[in-house]
Amino acid sequence: MFVLNDMPPAIDAERLTLLSRVETATVGHFLHDGFVDPQIQAVLPDKRVTGTAVTLRLPGADSTLLHHVMGLVRPGDVLVIDRAGDLRHACWGGVVTHAAKQAGVVAAIIDGPATDLGEIRRKEMPLWCRGPSPITTKLLGLSGALNVPVSCGGQVVEPGDAVLADESGVLVLKPDHIEAVAHRAIAMQDREVEVLTRISAGETLPAITGATAKIETAQQSQS
């Protein structure tokens, strides 16, 4: 059985541009939810992408729906693929990479393996997955679901969510949370630049952060 829902509204470019200034690891200093399992890792180094989540559930060895979706995706979309626990079959490879790039897909996040990683790198297709597998899915025409809530790396992702992905991991946000999260993270990143400048000028990290003072206070209270 196939479930085919409408494509979600695309998040406007201005908000995605703001989010693209953010590092996922910075958000990890103040948020503990919204993150995909860190075992789902980037195939390409030094890539940061933002986009609108288009969700798929592809059970077992059937990737028919993924091929179908290549006729529906839009520039700026991020495909988030729930493999329903299948860690054996690679649903993504070289041909799908070419089709996705041609359609303007900015990234794919797969809770499972991929294949043809060399070709994915040559095409510079931003992809996050659980590693390689030589065993591929087939066009079986059995089942799948498009634009339904999915689970990807333990994180619930709904169609239309905002996705931020970089070499440190993948973060999923509701679109109306973008501004608050982005502005807080950017302010933290600016302060980090100031800390690095002070370290380069000769100050020590514990003096700047107050770590040594906290330890001395703790030791005094223990004596």
Image (cartoon, rainbow, N blue to C red):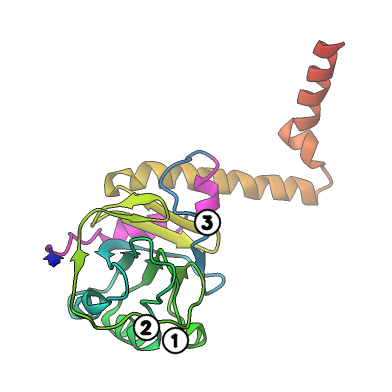
Q: Three-letter amino acid code at disc 3?
A: Pro
Task: Verify CB contact (< 8 Å) between mark 1 and mark 3.
Answer: no
Q: In the rendered view, would you say 162 is above or below 94? A: above
The CA span between labels 3 and 2 is: 22 Å
The segment highlighted magenta reads: 5-29
Q: Which residue is mark 3?
A: 38
Q: Earlier in the sequence, mark 2 or mark 1?
A: 2
Q: Three-letter amino acid code at disc 1?
A: Lys
Name the quadrant of the C terminus: top right
Question: For the point 40% across and 87% down, which residue is it?
Answer: 94
Task: Verify CB contact (< 8 Å) between mark 2 and mark 1.
Answer: yes
Question: For the point 71% across and 50% down, which residue is it?
Answer: 196
Task: Verify CB contact (< 8 Å) between mark 3 and mark 2.
Answer: no
Local packing at callout 3 (Cα closer than 10 Å; few below 14, some 14-19, many 20+) is some
Q: Nearer the viewer, residue 113 or 117?
A: 113
Q: Earlier in the sequence, mark 3 or mark 2?
A: 3
Element at badge 2? Answer: helix
Q: Which residue is mark 2?
A: 97
Q: Which residue is mark 1?
A: 123
Q: Position of residue 201 (x, y in %)?
A: 81, 48
Element at badge 3? Answer: loop
Magenta stretch: includes residue 25: yes
Q: Nearer the viewer, residue 104 or 100?
A: 100
Q: Quadrant of residue 46?
A: bottom right
Q: Quadrant of residue 49?
A: bottom left
Q: In the rendered view, would you say 129 is above or below 67? A: above
